[in-house]
Amino acid sequence: MKSLLLAPPLFNFLGQVNFLRQPNPLRQISFLLQILLLGSFVSFFFNNSVYSASLTAGSKSVGIKLGSASSGSEHYKVAGASLQYFALDNLAVGAAYEYWFSGNPTISKASLQSTYYIPFTAQIKPYVGVLYSHYFVEDRSDVDAYGYRLGVAYIKSPMILSAGIKQERYTSNRPVYFDQDPKLEFMVGFSF
């Protein structure tokens, strides 16, 4: 196997969860709400600062991603996490990891990203960002990509919800997706 395949135990567990194998959106939404509730409790317990989601220099955020992706005729379930550190007010640098399962070949993706949150209002912040990604593809050559992110974040301390688009360009002629059109992305995060 040429490529490195990253598969943390958490994502192996998620691959075993029955609701992710069935196309039942109510179960998926219920699971996501449970994660949000647990994350809110943990974030409040460890840091109940009113200003924790103000995106000021020195703050940090953790994000969770559950979703799906397609590559050719293969359809994948995707689980991921991200960490961000605010180096300056409204400017985050960070890393993200995604594990694509239930398709063949299995794919892992590691990304480095920088995101600027435009100070629109205290709770609504449009964002723009750049990213570099490395795809680890089981039994195939790895693929590198670079791209951008655009969207809007809703901040209700300590929770951050964001929705937007992400587009990547591949540095080789062997893309993971067959098209390079923008993809929708949704994230749930907690700042501390």
Image (tube, grey):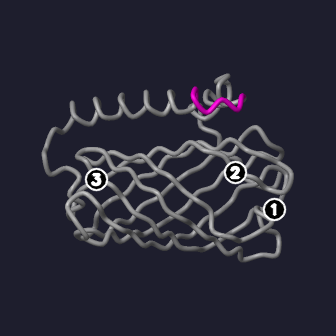
Q: Give the residue drawn at x 36%, y 28%.
A: 38
Q: Quadrant of residue 133?
A: bottom right
Q: Amino acid at mark 1?
A: Ser
Whether pointer 1 and pointer 2 mark residues with C-beta atoms closer than 8 Å, the reply is: no
Q: 10 Å neighbourhood of mark 1: few (<14), some, or many (≥20)? A: few
Residue at image position (56%, 70%) is 132
Q: Residue at x 34, y 50 (%)?
A: 160
Label 1 to label 3: alpha-carbon separation = 39 Å
Q: Residues within 10 Å of mark 3 (few under 14, many from 20)?
A: many
Instruction: Please state if 62 lies on the left or on the right of 55 as rendered.
Output: right
Q: Please give left or right for residue 122 compared with residue 91 in the image.
A: left
Say what amino acid the circle numbered 3 marks: Ile
Q: Which residue is mark 3?
A: 155
Q: Is residue 7 left or right of residue 131?
A: right
Q: Residues within 10 Å of mark 2 (few under 14, many from 20)?
A: some
| First reached walking from the N terminus: tag 1 or tag 3 | 1
**Which picture quadrant has residue 34?**
top left
Q: Secondary structure at mark 1?
A: loop
Q: Which mark is residue 85?
A: none
Q: Is 103 one of the magenta-colored residues?
A: no
Task: Give the number of the mark in front: 1 or 3.
Answer: 3
Viewer-side residue, 65 vs 151:
151
- Rendered location of residue 145, percent (x, y): 65, 71
Q: Which residue is mark 1?
A: 141
Q: Which residue is mark 2?
A: 69
